[in-house]
Image: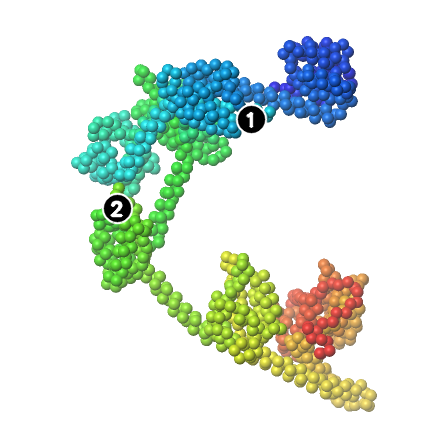
């Protein structure tokens, strides 16, 4: 942390001193001293030199510049802000020559003053930080074992530390003429001066073998860093490290790596297998070669123990026993084995139990020996280098630590702290970090390892988990050796830590992959084979044999078994593929072939394989592969072909066209992927042509219908919904115009809409519908005219204007009138229904207030309601509610709903007609308290001639068309009709219409047909 900035103010005015105190109080980390005169300030400034001096020019006694002159030579050199009311330029120039940093005029501008002060304080604080950094660098430079030098841009040596003099074997003078680059060139650094003084900023490094003045050769690593100061001044930092030992180690390591690379090119690691009950060992040639042994070496565990170093045999047996007892999941231990010529070979032994007996006891152990002598030698050498290898170990990610075994005090290098997710300045002790970031089990195991090392071989090799402060888990590997005292006791433990987290993750991923592979092989039903190519031996798994109907011991385990079972016709191409893989022409093979089963027949299998091992000459040593039974697949394919044939036969005989149309939502285009052959018969265009160019179909649609057809397709795909359409089509082959209907439903699948549907020829149906409509209209018109005349005559006779008639005749008149009324109602309903279905119904839409219409309907139906003993009640708002309607048709709608409500209401009940507006809609509802609508009938409520109770309907009257016509009329007015019914409680029919402004506006419509046409 920087020290507070010292500010001194020399001002004779009490008012200005208070102002300064107030303005400077807003700056943090500042200490302010006030003086009234120059004479009072002089001793105070000398005793406590300020960083910033705010100086009034006009003072009693000495003025401000005279005070600065008095301070000259005393070592007091603050930043000076001169405050003056004079604007004399000569005075300002004199002040600047005397060291004044800035000048500000009176009267003070508060904001400008604080801005000037803030800029000066920022410069002072930056200078303090720079001085502090330079001091720290100087201290570090003097104490560091690394040579350091600071050079000017022209190559002059500004400073250097003692370590650099020791490394160069001389003491360079810090004279203006001395150039360190020239001396380095004389010692062997090529183009040393040019490299040191090269333009640009950043880092650069070189390694060079220099000849020291005493004749010794010395390897040094030189790091050059160029920086620019805020003022643009370029400086050069040079760091010099002694890498003599590192170079020697590197040379040894390179030689070791060459030997290891040569060994790996020739052979693999040493492999061994231990049969525990018998004690027999199976050793590969590499294991024997590692120790200079030959095939005469006894392959028994008793012969292994004498080969182990006496210091290692106890820990090795202890770790093996821990694995056998299930305490440790595996065995891993670095130990020494005696070579045939007597020297010790360091090996890393790893092993795992692979077979357990019936009682869970281990039966067989498989392991490897890796020659790690070179690594162990390099590790031991690096542990002796100490601080000289700090940079190298940090680069390699290796942390070095030391534990005093008597005081239990430890020392870590910076990299070890980083391996624990912290820094060397962590306030916690190393013991606290250890206790907090390791689990109790790992701490106890490491303590046991150290105890064993002190008493035994002196080595600790283990891994433990560390949880970093940020919560992330890491795995560290530790290698440590006990340093013995001269009297033989254990003195300290020196070790290194390496982060092996990524290695363990990769091993875990590999183990998981192997587990998945084993599970897949065991669960997929595939047979596995393993072929020793050069010997001919082959392992054929039980599933491989079962696939062909054989038991485990019925066939010899040899590649000849496979060849003998192979179908003669398949053998040439199969052997070509296998030989190509063996020869390295292809990495693996896969083919389908026929194999002879135990019953003598042949069955199809899928054979896959690859070479997994080759010798030093590149010859194939081992191949593995699988057999998959294709019998079910071939049976399924045959069944699928038969099913497809039946499906095609069905589609070819279907009376319509079955198709599939696929729309790509990304490309926004669709195409027919399947069209049944009936397309040619129905539409005169071949199915194959439609799948290539669907415009052939679109262009034959009737011109008046074509746009509606395209719009229907666009609407369906936009909403990913069903598609329905009826229209006219002109066959291109005969010119015949037909009516057709299409329908399909989509399935969504990864950016595709798949429409499966049918196209039907509905020409005949349309003709029949047209004949029906014409017949109904003709009959209705022909009946209505005489019926109207008959009804008029009956009503005239019943009125008594033609004279009195007998009571019996009068009753017959009334019955005739009722039946004629019902017949006229039926004829009118049939005419309306015919117009609706043919699209000939016209409406005269107007924006009208609804209350007058509702009141008229109430008046017209009052007498009708009284005939059933029912009272009509109107509920309506005080103001007008308007909607766009056809007056007469709305009266017809409400009359129909009121008549139904009256007919089915018990005598004495009320039927309520309500009008209300809410949320931009108008609701006209009719409510009664009759028997209601049964749940079983609701789905047919708006069907033609539908009646909940036909016998009751005959008693009440009605055609069964009223609600169908009502629903059609409401929908033509852009509305909807809703029904709510609780049987024997209440039934409500509601007509919902869009609300409109109460302005009378006529809107004529006839569904595309002029009103005069009706």
Disc with the residue nearer the chain's start (2 vs 1): 1
Q: Foreground: 983 or 967?
A: 967
Can see residue 503? Answer: yes
Q: In which quarter of the image is the C terminus?
A: bottom right
Q: How many labels does the image show?
A: 2
Q: Is residue 628 above or below residue 788?
A: above
Q: Residue 619 carries which label?
A: 2
Describe the element under mark 1 as helix, strand or loop: strand
Question: Would you say 705 lies left or right of 536 here?
Answer: right
Q: Is mark 2 on a helix, strand or loop?
A: loop
Write down the quadrant of residue 818 in the picture.
Answer: bottom right
Q: Position of residue 27 (x, y in %)?
A: 68, 24
Q: Nearer the viewer, mark 2 or mark 1?
A: 1
Quarter of the rendering occupied by the N terminus: top right
Q: Is residue 907 left or right of residue 285?
A: right
Residue positioned 41% across, 20% down in the render: 186
Q: Name the residue under label 1.
A: 228
Crowding around mark 1 (Cα neighbors within 10 Å: few <14, some 14 to 19, many 20+) is few
Residue drawn at x 72%, y 72% is 1005
Residue 355: horizontal and vertical position, in percent? 28, 42
Residue 293: x and y, percent?
A: 20, 34
Is 833 on the left-hand or right-hand side of 851?
Answer: left
Q: Can residue 927 be seen in this view?
A: no
Q: What residue sits 66% from the left and 11% below the top? A: 72
- Asked if 654 appears above or below 159 in the picture, the reply is below
Can you say whether 584 is above or below 984 in the image? above
Q: Residues within 10 Å of mark 2 (few under 14, many from 20)?
A: some
Measuring from the top left, give residue 594's x and y in whole percent: 28, 61
Q: Give the residue drawn at x 27%, y 56%.
A: 576
């Amino acid at each position: 942390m920087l020290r507070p900035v010292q500010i001194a103010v020399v001002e004779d005015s009490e008012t200005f001193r208070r102002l300064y105190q107030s303005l400077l109080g807003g700056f943090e980390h500042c200490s302010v001293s006030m003086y009234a005169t120059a004479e009072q300030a002089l001793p105070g400034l000398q005793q406590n030199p300020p960083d910033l001096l705010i100086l009034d020019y006009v003072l009693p006694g000495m003025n401000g510049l005279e005070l600065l002159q008095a301070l000259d030579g005393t070592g007091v050199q603050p930043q000076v802000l001169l405050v003056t009311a004079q604007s004399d330029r000569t005075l300002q120039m004199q002040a600047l020559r005397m060291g004044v940093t800035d000048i500000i005029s009176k009267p003070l501008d508060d904001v400008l003053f604080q801005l000037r002060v803030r800029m000066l304080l920022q410069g002072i604080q930056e200078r303090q930080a720079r001085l502090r950094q330079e001091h720290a660098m100087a201290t570090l430079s003097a104490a560091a074992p690394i040579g350091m030098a600071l050079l000017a841009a022209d190559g002059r040596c500004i400073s250097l530390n003692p370590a650099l003099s020791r490394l160069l074997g001389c003491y360079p003078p810090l004279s203006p003429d001395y150039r360190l680059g020239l001396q380095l060139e004389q010692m062997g650094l090529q183009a040393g001066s040019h490299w040191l003084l090269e333009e640009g900023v950043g880092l650069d490094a070189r390694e060079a073998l220099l000849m020291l003045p005493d004749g010794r050769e010395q390897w040094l690593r030189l790091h050059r860093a160029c920086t620019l100061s805020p003022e643009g001044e370029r400086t050069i930092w040079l760091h010099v490290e002694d890498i003599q030992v590192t170079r020697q180690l590197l040379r040894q390591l390179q030689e070791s790596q060459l030997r290891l690379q040569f060994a790996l090119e020739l052979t693999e690691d040493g492999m061994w297998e231990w049969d525990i009950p018998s004690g027999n060992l199976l050793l590969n040639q590499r294991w024997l070669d590692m120790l200079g042994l030959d095939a005469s070496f006894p392959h028994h565990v008793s012969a292994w123990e004498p080969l182990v170093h006496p210091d290692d045999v106890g820990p090795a047996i202890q770790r093996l026993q821990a694995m056998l007892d299930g305490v440790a999941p595996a065995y891993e231990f670095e130990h020494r084995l005696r070579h045939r010529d007597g020297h010790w070979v360091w090996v890393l032994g790893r092993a795992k139990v692979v077979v357990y007996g019936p009682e869970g006891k281990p039966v067989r152990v498989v392991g490897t020996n890796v020659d790690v002598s070179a690594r162990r030698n390099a590790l031991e050498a690096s542990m002796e280098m100490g601080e000289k290898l700090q940079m190298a170990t940090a680069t390699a990610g290796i942390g070095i630590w030391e534990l005093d075994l008597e005081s239990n005090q430890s020392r870590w290098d910076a990299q070890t702290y980083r391996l624990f997710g912290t820094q060397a300045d962590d306030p916690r002790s190393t013991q606290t970090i250890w206790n907090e970031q390791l689990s109790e089990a790992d701490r106890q195991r490491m303590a046991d390892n150290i105890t064993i090392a002190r008493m035994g071989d002196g080595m600790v090799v283990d891994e433990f988990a560390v949880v970093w402060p940020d919560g992330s888990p890491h795995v560290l590997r530790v290698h440590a050796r006990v340093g013995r005292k001269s009297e033989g006791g254990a003195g300290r433990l020196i070790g290194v830590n390496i982060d092996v987290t990524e290695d363990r993750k990769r091993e875990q991923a590999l183990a998981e992959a192997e587990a998945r592979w084993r599970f897949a092989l065991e669960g997929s039903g595939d047979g596995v084979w393993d072929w020793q190519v050069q010997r001919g031996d082959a392992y054929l798994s039980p599933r491989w044999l079962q696939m062909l109907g054989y038991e485990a011991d019925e066939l010899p385990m040899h590649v000849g078994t496979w060849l003998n079972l192979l179908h003669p016709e398949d053998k040439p191409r199969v052997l070509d593929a296998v030989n190509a893989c063996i020869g390295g022409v292809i990495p693996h093979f896969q083919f389908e072939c026929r194999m002879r089963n135990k019953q003598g027949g042949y069955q199809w299998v899928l054979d896959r394989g690859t070479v997994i091992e080759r010798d030093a000459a590149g010859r194939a040593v081992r191949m593995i592969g699988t057999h998959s039974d294709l019998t079910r697949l071939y049976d399924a394919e045959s069944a699928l072909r038969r099913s497809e044939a039946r499906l095609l036969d069905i589609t070819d005989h279907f009376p319509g066209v079955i198709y599939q149309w696929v729309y790509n939502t990304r490309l926004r285009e669709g195409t027919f992927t399947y069209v049944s052959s009936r397309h040619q018969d129905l539409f005169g265009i071949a199915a194959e042509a439609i799948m290539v160019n669907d415009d052939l179909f679109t262009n034959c649609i009737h011109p008046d219908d074509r746009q509606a057809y395209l719009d229907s397709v666009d609407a369906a795909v936009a909403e990913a919904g069903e598609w329905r359409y009826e229209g006219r089509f002109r066959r291109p082959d005969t010119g015949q115009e037909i009516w057709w209907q299409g329908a399909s439903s989509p399935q969504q699948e990864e950016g595709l809409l798949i429409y499966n549907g049918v196209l039907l020829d509905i020409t005949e149906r349309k003709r029949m519908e047209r004949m029906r409509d014409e017949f109904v209209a003709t009959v209705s018109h022909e009946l209505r005219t005489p019926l109207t005349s008959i009804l008029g005559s009956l009503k005239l006779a019943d009125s008594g204007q033609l004279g009195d008639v007998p009571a019996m005749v009068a009753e017959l008149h009334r019955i005739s009138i009722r039946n004629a009324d019902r017949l006229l109602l039926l004829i009118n309903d049939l005419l309306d229904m015919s117009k609706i279905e043919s699209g000939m119904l016209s409406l005269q839409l107007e924006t009208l207030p609804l209350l007058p219409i509702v009141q008229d309907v109430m008046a017209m139906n009052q007498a009708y309601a009284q005939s059933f003993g029912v009272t009509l009640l109107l509920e309506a708002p005080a103001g007008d509610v308007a909607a766009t309607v056809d007056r007469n048709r709305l009266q017809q709608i409400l009359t129909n709903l009121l008549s139904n409500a009256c007919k089915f209401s018990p005598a004495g009940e009320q039927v309520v007609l309500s009008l209300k507006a809410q949320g931009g809609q108008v609701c006209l509802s009719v409510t009664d308290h009759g028997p209601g609508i049964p749940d079983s009938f609701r789905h047919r409520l708006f069907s033609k001639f539908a009646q909940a109770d036909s016998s009751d309907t005959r008693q009440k009257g009605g055609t069964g068309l009223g609600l169908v016509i009502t629903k059609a009329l409401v929908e033509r007015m852009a509305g909807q009709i809703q029904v709510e019914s609780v049987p024997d409680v209440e039934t409500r029919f509601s007509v919902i219409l869009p609300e409109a402004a109460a302005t009378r506006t006529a809107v004529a419509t006839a569904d595309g047909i002029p009103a005069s046409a009706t």
